[in-house]
Image: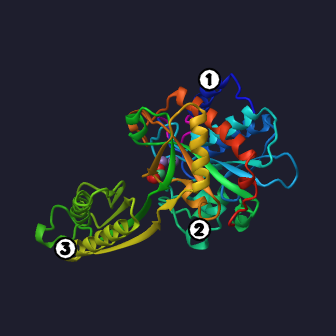
Amino acid sequence: MAIAENIATRAQEVVNRCRRLAEFSESAEGTTRTFLSAPMRRCHEEIGGWLEAIGAEMRVDPAGNVRGFYAGDKSGAPRLLLGSHLDTVPNAGAFDGVLGVVLAVALLEELAGKRLPFSIEVEGFSEEEGVRFGTPFIGSRALVGRLDDELLKRVDAGGVSMRRAIEAFGLNPGKLQEAVLQDDVLGYLEFHIEQGPVLESLELPLGVVEAIAGQTRMEFTFSGRSNHAGTTPMNLRRDALAAAAEWIVAVEQTAKSVQGLVATVGRIEAKPGATNVIVGEARLSLDVRHKLDEIRVSAASSLIQQAQQIAASRGLSARHALLNQEAVAMDSFLVEEIEEAIRKSGCTPQRMTSGAGHDAMILAEKVPAAMIFLRTPGGISHDPAETVETEDVAKAIECGLHLLEQLASSREFLKRTSRA
Ligand code: GLV
Ligand code: MN
Ligand code: MN
């Protein structure tokens, strides 16, 4: 497979397309696109047009994932999955997730109709960030059969359940089985911006992910008693927001005291939320990460205990809902193939652990999975200033084409079957 000469143009188009998708937003300014929101449909339409032009069949599965199928050289050929997620955090940049989907489409375009001994399925996952339901990876969970009734019952800030959100988008949650991977999958590959400073500091455009750090996410509720702000003396208050504030400081101190531990309270909601009313209920999110699962798990349980102690000392109660995602190793065969493809693109591969979570960690439960990182200018992500160098995107396309060529001629790869 000769590498096409127009890769620089293709890379520019990839960047332009990411910026175009960033226009599909729930907010008038910036980009916010959560699970099955109206702008997600606009995204689907746009991507559907690109897929149709290259003869790939597109469907939206019952979990709202875009699935674009580009057939292999014979019927019944096994399939390779290539993609990332289409949802965003509030006030996001244009590249987190979206870049991996747009790059997958660009690789199919570069194939220019050529068929490989495997089909390629482009994945545009409906949800990875966990913004709408406090639950990350909704899209990729559906592919591994982990979108269960418990999760479907979760409600968003407006009281809409996940099940209802799926129905409101015109999809059938009763058919989620149709989203689950069959046993013809050879593996999953995901291009993603690094979202950190490592590649930039090493002056390298591309990296290969060896492992993805685990994460614990929690929803905490402190319940006290709302009352009049003018008439209730300080010693007779059960102020839920003051308890939450004490705990937030404890979260910061706990994380600072353990090497490599990060813990974040990213959202807080106080009820009833008026200047002259003591807060009766405070709800907070907590995100805890460390590359070693034991350290993360023990920090999370210490933070739960501290919340309970703070609540008890103030005459309040504290409850929490917990979601754990363990650290995951990437497939060593694919990691080595990626390293070779990066070298063939004229770059030095850098092995790294991802501190951010990715759909690849969910897919890895069922199929061999691996990721390629692109340098992130300034290490900035989850912010409108997030960007990528067009030259690095060109290197990623080159790397992807080498990788497809390597895999297409690898007997070892083609005889692998999925663990589904
Ligand atoms: C994904 O962006 C994460 O929060 O790890
Ligand atoms: Mn993200
Ligand atoms: Mn992401």
Please report the bounds of the magenta region as a residue range: 22-29
- Left or right of 148, for residue 245: left
Q: What is the quadrant of the C terminus in the image?
A: bottom right
Q: Amino acid at mark 3?
A: Arg
Question: Sequence order check: which comes first, mark 2 or mark 3?
Answer: 2
Q: Which residue is mark 2?
A: 152
Residue 204 higher or lower than 119, as above or below: above
Write the residue at 36% across / 65% down. 296
Give 212 or 220, whichever is nearer the viewer.
Answer: 212
Question: Sequence order check: which comes first, mark 1 or mark 2?
Answer: 1
Mark 2: few/some/many CA within 10 Å (<14, 14-19, 20+): some
Q: What is the spatial separation of the Cα atoms under label 2 and label 3, in whole angstroms?
A: 35 Å
Give 53 or 32, whichever is nearer the viewer.
Answer: 53
Q: Main secondary structure of the magenta part?
A: loop
Q: Amino acid at mark 1?
A: Ala
Q: Which residue is mark 3?
A: 314
